[in-house]
Image (spheres, rainbow, N blue to C red):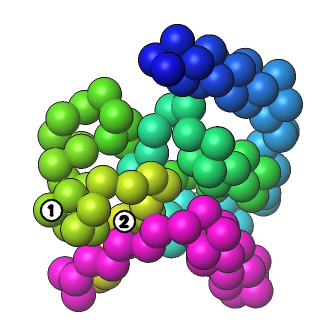
Amino acid sequence: MNLVRWLLGRLILCYELLFSPRTRQHSPAVQTKLDALTRDLALYQFPACPFCVKVRFAIKRLGLNVETRDARRVPAFRQELLNGGGKIMAPCLRIADPNGGTQWLYQSADIIRYLEQRLATAQSAR
């Protein structure tokens, strides 16, 4: 079973390498706004997780700068995910509120929807 997981993981990483979308280019003003909007975001992920790959593709396609944290290999990130989000499940987007609060968003579709809304906010504020 471990061999099968290892092989599937390598296939998923190969797929990501071969089919990763191009990074969307924004004007410097929009990119500055996007960077400010995504400064307090962190994506807790597992490298070979297909749902995490889906979110990483969306981040790249949207041209966002979101910190990624490997919760599989880095015990400190794994513990942060468990303590903050309540479960070790990836992908999970940590959203730090300017008022000091933190929200943990699970599910790839919900994360992508949230990031697309952030992009729309930055572009509409031109």
Q: Position of residue 14 (x, y in %)?
A: 73, 19
Q: Secondary structure at mark 1?
A: helix
Q: Is residue 51 visible?
A: yes
Q: Is residue 103 magenta?
A: yes
Please name the residue that numbered disc 2 is placed on: 94
| Viewer-closest of 113 and 31 | 113
Question: What residue is at 58 percent from the left and 18 percent from the top?
Answer: 4
Q: Which residues are magenta?
A: 99-126
Q: Is residue 15 magenta?
A: no
| Viewer-closest of 12 and 17 | 12
Secondary structure that dominates the magenta span: helix
Amino acid at the residue labelled 2: Arg
Rendered view: 49 above or below 92 = above
Rendered view: 54 above or below 117 = above
9 relative position to 90: left or right? right
Amino acid at the residue labelled 1: Asn
**Disc 1 crowd, CA 10 A, few/some/many (<14, 14-19, 20+):** few
The circle on residue 83 is 1
- Residue contact at pointers 1 and 2, CB within 8 angstroms: no
Which residue is situated farthest in the front direction here?
A: 1
**Disc 2 crowd, CA 10 A, few/some/many (<14, 14-19, 20+):** many
Q: Is residue 33 visible?
A: no
79 relative position to 22: left or right? left
1 vs 2, front mark: 1
Residue 29: image quadrant is bottom right
Question: What residue is at 46 percent from the left and 17 percent from the top?
Answer: 2
